[in-house]
Amino acid sequence: QTIFFDLKPILSKIHTSHWELDDQIRTVLSTLRDYFQDIKLWIPDYFFAKFIRKCFEILRHMYLKSFFSKGYLKARTVDAITAAALLERDRLNLLQFFSQECLELRQTG
């Protein structure tokens, strides 16, 4: 929970005009990467894998909650094609990040 409390200011910019101008998800993922590198030193791989999965679930939930709760669909500041491109960009960044984390875990045993 501490990690996501620290990320809350960044996550609050998702699905706002900041989201359209800046790649907020990359900032979130960069912060998570820093946390993961530190935490990996302290817990066994088995629990680290569970931790990563839980982080993915929490982040996915926060992202979708933000998208639907801010009325972004009703009060779009960009056209539907641009919004879809932004969503796809974020989806690909999330998948790439968490796939890479899982791959590294598999390689280390």
Image (cartoon, rainbow, N blue to C red):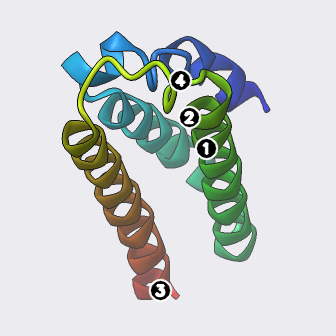
Sequence-first tag of 4 and 3: 4
Q: CA distance from mark 3 to mark 2?
A: 32 Å
Please state which amino acid type lies under the numbered disc 3.
Arg
Residue tagged 2: 67
Labels 2 and 1 touching (C-beta < 8 A): yes
Q: Position of residue 20 (x, y in %)?
A: 26, 22
The residue at which mark 4 appears reads as 11
Q: Of helix, strand and loop, which one carries label 1?
A: helix
Can residue 41 be spotted in the picture?
Answer: no
User: Tag 1 or tag 3, which sits nearer the N-term?
Assistant: 1
Q: Secondary structure at mark 4?
A: helix
- The residue mark sitting in front, 4 or 3, is 4
**Structural distance between the alpha carbons of marks 3 and 1:** 28 Å
Q: Which residue is mark 1?
A: 64
Q: Evaluate if marks 2 and 4 touch, with contact meaning CB atoms under 8 Å apart.
A: no
Q: Earlier in the sequence, mark 3 or mark 2?
A: 2
